[in-house]
Amino acid sequence: PSIPSHAEFDGLVATDPNPLDVIRDRSPADNPVTDEGATLGRVLFYDTLLSQNRTVSCASCHRPELGFSDDNVFSEGFDGRETGRHSMGLTNARYTGNGRYFWDERAATLEEQVLMPIQDEVEMGLTLDELVDRVAAAEHYPVLFTAAFGDDEVTSERIAFALAQFVRSLVSFGAKYDEGRGQVGSVYDEFPNFTDAENRGRDLFFEPLHFGGFDCGSCHHGEAFVGPVATSNGLDAVSSDDLGVAEHSELDDDIGRFRVPSLRNIAVRPPYMHDGRFASLDEVIDHYSDGVQGHPALTVYRLEDGSGLQLDMTGEQKADLKAFLLTLTDDAMLADEKFQDPFNR
């Protein structure tokens, strides 16, 4: 993908204004994104052959018009059962902070992650052997595997590599935000293409708390707007039903921590949070204004007494912050033909 100069620093995606605080491109050396590999991955991503009853694909829960997420609180699997968490958007997944995937970060690489939903008994319901057999028997794949890998052998590793390449190709740097960011030296400068409200919202988003901002960038770093580490955002005071990262790590310190997704294309992918509890951006902003609870894993907004910081936003501040978040929508990327369903369903 084409990455603008303001988002690059020695091959890394940098957090402005400190180039030492970076978000890394997590593409591994043994699986670089190629046109042929990502094309194969695109076909696999949209192919319902990859589910037990041939009714759903990866794209069923990651729809391009919805920021490669979906609009259900919990996603629906191949036999109508619901998943345990809301579908995470895939935009800028290649820049995830610590290189781990899923809300609970149980996948150490994207290559691991893309095979897990296929094998999940609720989501797609295939074994890896069934997956390989189905793909190998489909007449449209030999030419695609040959183009991507040099011959038409189908393996689960090759399927994982291709799917991961397609997901890594879902990069967004073409929003109104980027148009403005390319014209200034810092995110703290006034963007010439922004309205007054959008510029005020930009200030609120990036400025630290002690400068009158809301310090949103502490958890949504850099030009990719992704989180460096899993954290709590104070949705609850105590985690009981969903323990987050602790369900994988089994560490008490990880209870209630969840991976922080990119805010790119955030406006088109409600509902929000790992459990889809907020139906709109307005509800999300209201939460950060006066609903943050003092969860033990809370970081930026946790006070010394253990309670959650209440930002007490004014109506204008809420409107301004929302106006800024809307500038992160990349309509051209979401409508790009190379990311759409090749089966034209």
Image (cartoon, grey):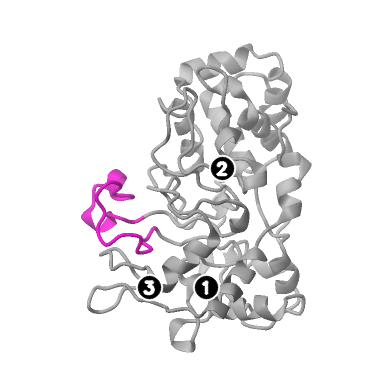
Residue 55 coordinates in the image, percent (x, y): 57, 22
Looking at the image, do the residues carrying marks 1 and 3 touch, with CB atoms under 8 Å apart? no
Q: Of the numbered discs in the image, which one, if any, rests on residue 300?
A: 3
| Residue at the (41%, 60%) spot, across then down | 229
Is residue 148 placed above or below 325 in the rendered structure? above
Q: Amino acid at mark 3?
A: Val
Looking at the image, do the residues carrying marks 3 and 2 touch, with CB atoms under 8 Å apart? no
Q: Is residue 219 visible?
A: yes
- Return the residue at label 1: 20
Q: Amino acid at mark 1?
A: Leu
Viewer-side residue, 194 vs 182: 194
> Quick one: SS at disc 1?
loop
Is residue 153 placed above or below 63 in the rendered structure? above
The region drawn magenta spans: 230-257
Tag in front: 1 or 3: 3
> Which residue, as the protein is rendered here, is positioned at the far front?
315
> Quick one: SS at disc 2?
loop
Residue 115 coordinates in the image, percent (x, y): 49, 31
- Return the residue at label 2: 70
| Residue at the (33%, 50%) spot, across then down | 245
| Residue at the (64%, 39%) spot, across then down | 166
Tag in front: 3 or 2: 2
Q: CA distance from mark 1 to mark 3?
A: 20 Å
Q: CA distance from mark 1 to mark 2?
A: 35 Å
| Residue at the (67%, 45%) spot, across then down | 65
In the image, is 273 to the left or to the right of 243?
right
Q: Earlier in the sequence, mark 3 or mark 2?
A: 2
Q: CA distance from mark 3 to mark 2?
A: 29 Å
- Residue 254 in magenta stretch: yes
In the image, is 144 to the left or to the right of 14?
right
Residue 202 coordinates in the image, percent (x, y): 61, 76
